[in-house]
Image (cartoon, grey):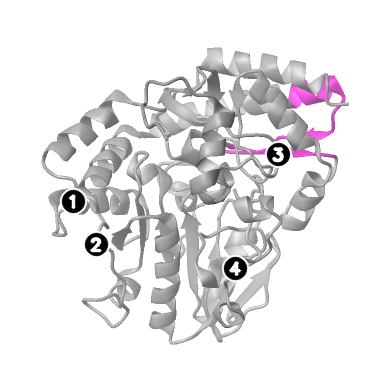
Amino acid sequence: MSFESDLPHNNQELYSRACQLIPGGVNSPVRAFKSVGGVPFFTSRGEGAYLFDEEGNKYVDYIQSYGACILGHGDSRVAAAISSAAKNGTTFGTPTLAEVELAELIVDRVEGLEMLRLTSSGTEATMSAIRVARGFTGRDKILKFDGCYHGHSDALLVAGGSGVASLSIPDSVGVPMSAISDTVVAPYNKLPELDDSFAAVIVEPIAANMGLVAPGPGFLEALRKRCNENGIVLIFDEVITGFRVGYGGASGLFGIIPDMWCFGKVIGGGLPIGAFGGKREIMQRLAPEGPVYQAGTLSGNPIATAAGITVINLLEETSYETLKDTAAKLTSGLREVFAAGGIPAQVPQVSSLVGLFFGDLQVTNYASAKESVGLGLYEKFFHGMLDQGIALAPGPYEAIFPGLSHGQRELDRTLEAATKVVSNLH
């Protein structure tokens, strides 16, 4: 087998090679094309709003590493920060200044957030937050919402959206019933019955793993009130929304303060990182200060924290105005394209996040999202757009992520492609 990087490649050949060594040919199921059919393209590099694959094809990219690359690919300022940090070492296993600075930046932006711990992924953040909530309350039961994805830890891998939904796996083989016996699942946008046997409620304040579903009027407020009444820790999973939908994330956007937060994506500038935090009295239960154990040799990695500090410092209030304006132009343009083409579709928008659902049914939760997906139009739209040089996520339960690198040229090209594709969807 040759490993010479200068040999010409094509996506089919690379996928065949990958499938011999990597289960399904991908290192995360969401990257596979199983739910849309075909062979995934292999990216060679990114530049701003664009991806280039190993065959030399160029795509306007709305995946943006599922929202992580808010500044666009290959941002020179982030690259410089990474390069500078790497020269000093890639990992130490000791505390660093950058860990403190990143924590200070995050806490400063999020009202109510008092203490923070860094992890290496969003999954680690959510599983750790659940453990702390259980340790703080002395209770075992947790509640999540149908279609909300909180990573692949056993207790939360039940009725998840996103990649799990795309693969039609409501749960996962290998997860014992005992791991989810204390996990209760409720419909999103419907206030659940709660009592003092629950340790925590974890929710995506803006659901972005069942497509894009906004919280209904009063839903989050009522959830906050009911958790208060029963001494339940309310956890906002902001791995996607944190520092993407607003200066202070979704909690700042809606003015609702949970007890704990989980972050990822944006805070690493495209590098692996996550974080969870909350009220001081809760976070002080963590070891070494308290009895709840959580650890990670690579947590607060110096290269990831350098990138995260750079990105967050670059995201000002005006950045979010620009992001929202770009998303609004894309949203209105797509709505016009579908309407003109006679294709029933909904294009929801919440701040800088955009979604797509086919059909007339108003999508408010996972059940209605599945009805939309069941129409089977996303697969055709996805491949049509890809053929036109527009990269969307290869699954109907993902959001669309316009970023700061998407300008009018990219929007015009996207809407022109969509017009051609929609004309062939009948």
Label 1 residue SS? loop
Give the extent of the magenta segment.
335-359
The residue that mark 1 highlights is 91
Dot 3 or dot 2, earlier in sequence = 3
Dot 1 and dot 3 residues touching (CB under 8 Å): no
- x then y, percent, for residue 251: 47, 53
Tell me the mark number nearer the camera, choosing from 3 and 4.
3
Dot 2 and dot 1 residues touching (CB under 8 Å): yes
Dot 4 and dot 2 residues touching (CB under 8 Å): no
Q: Specify the amino acid type for callout 2.
A: Thr
Q: How far is disc 4 from disc 1 in space, using C-alphas?
A: 35 Å
Dot 3: within a 10 Å radius of its alpha carbon, few (fewer than 14), some, or many (20 or more) residues?
Answer: many
Dot 4 or dot 1, earlier in sequence = 1
Q: Specify the amino acid type for callout 3.
A: Val
Q: Is residue 187 above or below residue 328?
A: below
The residue that mark 4 highlights is 144
